[in-house]
Image (cartoon, rainbow, N blue to C red):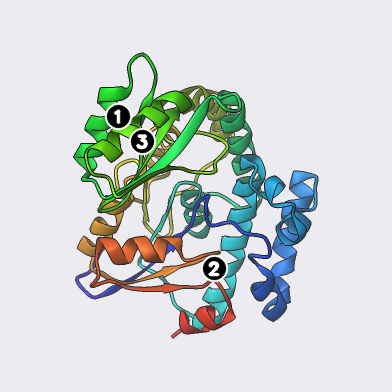
Amino acid sequence: MSQKSELAVVFPGQGSQSLGMVNSLLENHPEANELFAIASGILGYDLLEIITSGPLEKLNQTEITQPALLVSAFATWNVWKQMSGLSPAVLAGHSLGEYTALVCAGVISFEESIALVAERGRCMQKAVPHDIGAMAAILGLEDQQVIQVCHAVAGNEIVSAANFNSPGQVVIAGHKAAVERAIVAAKEIGAKRAMMLPVSVPSHCLLMKQAADEFAGSLNKVTFKDAQIPVVQNVDAIARTSAAEIKPALLEQLYRPVLWSESVVNLKKLNVIKIIECGPGKVLSGLIKRIDKTIETVSTHDEAALLNATG
């Protein structure tokens, strides 16, 4: 990439969903409805009805959350591109958001991505029975401290760092009992907070290896194209354009931790000075500010924010 100042766009993952999360977008840009109609036809149920009316428990089911967030973020991207006329130099997404980034980069088609992320969610949900796995947020410890806590309490179970979200914020995942032990141990060494997260699957840990093995069949049926815009991938925070390199890293993402802090650091090394969070919520904008305060962050969670992001 050149040495000039650059713009990046990032896309949120699970945890950013909420009922009515696209109400503002659709009220002001009704053309975005078409994408939800296409997705609903592929999925076999009314995706927009669930996003709009719930119940929330249904929206939070992993196999529904994933296409819901992807379509919402991709619709926002289309509107933002049309309104701004801007072209980012690089893209990234947090967990599920990486798939949105790949659609926007032209690596996979929108239609193929819908079926793919729904299947990804199904494989994840199937891999670990309900109440066997868990995730927790650990706040106020160094990354290495969290890693050491997980190692110390694991025993013959699995618990490990799943998301390195920002300095002092690490999410862990694994067997529920082991995650509970890690919460206690983290508090004992000075964690400011350590709490269970309301998720249905323990993402980004070795409990998801079975899901990755099953999902590989679906992923390998999809033809990937080289990225028109480089995408920084979660597993190693490296920006890639090669389809042959993107696909295996995407599969590893299911059972390896999300290196979000390192991804943002590497965006800065690529001369990024402004990052737009494209999609529901403001989760990534908050994390980015904690990682590097010199990077300007802009969310697109409602019409006012979207207008601000087009300047």
Return the residue at label 2: 77
Return the residue at label 3: 183
What is the crowding at mark 1: few (fewer than 14 residues within 10 Å), some, or many (at least 20)? many
- Up-down relation of residue 6 to residue 191 (above or below): below
Question: Is label 3 or label 2 in front?
Answer: 3
Asked if the residue under mark 2 is in contact with the one under mark 3, i.e. CB atoms within 8 Å, the reply is no
Instruction: Tell me: 51 left or right of 274.
Output: right
Question: Is label 1 or label 2 in front?
Answer: 1
The image shows residue 206 at horizontal and vertical percentages of: 41, 25
- Looking at the image, tell me whether mark 1 or mark 2 is earlier in sequence order: 2
The image shows residue 93 at horizontal and vertical percentages of: 43, 54
What is the crowding at mark 3: few (fewer than 14 residues within 10 Å), some, or many (at least 20)? many
Q: Residue at x 43, y 51 (%)?
A: 94
* Image mark for residue 165: none
- Distance from disc 3 to disc 1, alpha carbons, whole Å, reads 9 Å
Q: Nearer the viewer, residue 176 or 203?
A: 176
- Distance from disc 1 to disc 2, alpha carbons, whole Å, reads 38 Å
- Up-down relation of residue 205 to residue 237 (above or below): above
What is the crowding at mark 2: few (fewer than 14 residues within 10 Å), some, or many (at least 20)? many
Q: Quadrant of the N terminus?
A: bottom left
Element carrying mark 2: helix
Return the residue at label 1: 150
State the residue lying farthest toward the front: 188
Q: Residue at x 25, y 24 (%)?
A: 152
Quarter location, residue 246:
top left
